[in-house]
Image (tube, grey):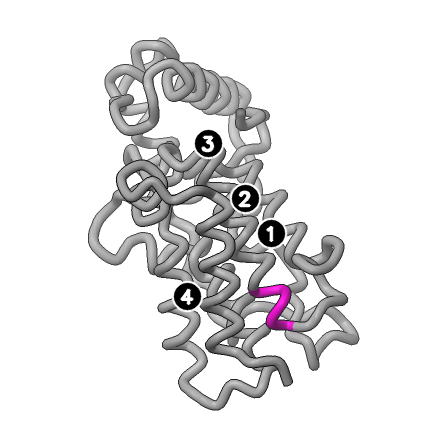
Amino acid sequence: MVRITAMITQMDRSPLITTDTLPRVEGTAATGELHALPMLEPTRHERADAARNRVAILQAAERLVAAEGAGIVTMDQVACAAKVGKGTLFRHFGDRCGLMRALLDERERSFQEDFIRGPAPLGPGAPARERMVAFGERMLDHIEIQGDLLAAAENGAPGERLRHSVYGAYRAHLVALLEETNYGGEIGYLVDVLLAALVSELVLHQRRVLEMSPEQLKRCWGELVRTLLPAA
C-alpha cells in the first residue's frame, strides 16, 4: 500500500517531459542516463492547514481504495471521509485522476530511482536490450500489485496519459536505451508501441479475461523486445 506523507505532491498538472528537456548525469552522455526524477514536481510550500488537508485527503482516499477498489471510489466519498469540502479536494488534485496519481507518487518515485540509478539489469550496467526487458518486467509487477489504481489514474481525458510527465519519463528512458542499440528504425514510434503493451488496462484484461499468467506476460514481453532488437 502506498505510504502517505506530507511530501506527496500534485501530479496531474506536471509538464510534458521530452528527451530535449531532461538533464544528463555527468559522465553518462553516451548512455543517456536520466539525472533527476522528472515525474514529480518540486514540493510546493503550503500553509499548515492546507498541508493537513492534503494528507487527510490522501489517507482517506487510500483507505477507500483499499476497501472498495480504485474503480468505484468517488470524489464525494473521499471528501466526506476526509471531512473536507469538495472545493478543497478539487483545488488540491484537480480531478479524480489527479487524486489517483497522487496515491501512486511514492511507488513511482521508487521505480524511477531504480531504473535511473538502481542495480542492473533495470539500472545502469547491463546491455540496453536487457534493461528494456527488465523495465517491462518491473512494469508488469507494478500493475500486478496495484493495477486498478493505475487504471483509474490513466482514465482521464483523451491523450492526457500520453501528455503526462510519468509517460514522458518512461518514454525518455526507453528512447535513451534504444539509442544505444543498433536499431535503425523510427525510435520514438517504437517506444510508443512498446509502452502501449504495458498500459494497465490492457495488462489487466490479459490477466483477468484472457487468463494469462504474470510469468507468461513477462516471457512475451522479453520475446517482443529481443525479436525487435537482436543481440549486437
* Residue matched to label 4: 194
Of callouts 2 and 4, the N-terminal one? 2
Image quadrant for the C terminus? bottom right
Badge 1: few (under 14), some or many (20 or more) residues near its Cα, within 10 Å?
many
* Residue matched to label 2: 108
Tag 3 secondary structure: helix
Q: CA distance from mark 1 to mark 4?
A: 18 Å
Q: Residue at x 49, y 66 (%)?
A: 223
Q: Which residues are magenta?
A: 128-132
Q: CA distance from mark 1 to mark 3?
A: 16 Å
In front of the other: label 2 or label 4?
4
Q: Amino acid at mark 4?
A: Leu
Name the spot of residue 123 as percent of width and height, x first. Answer: 69, 59
Q: Amino acid at mark 3?
A: Leu
Q: CA distance from mark 3 to mark 4?
A: 25 Å
Name the spot of residue 115 as percent of width and height, x first. Answer: 64, 56
Is the C-beta separation of discs 2 and 4 under 8 Å? no
Q: CA distance from mark 2 to mark 1?
A: 6 Å
* Residue matched to label 1: 112
Is the C-beta separation of discs 2 and 3 under 8 Å? no
Residue 129 among those drawn in magenta: yes
Helix, strand or loop: magenta stretch: helix
Q: Amino acid at mark 1?
A: Gln
Tag 4 secondary structure: helix
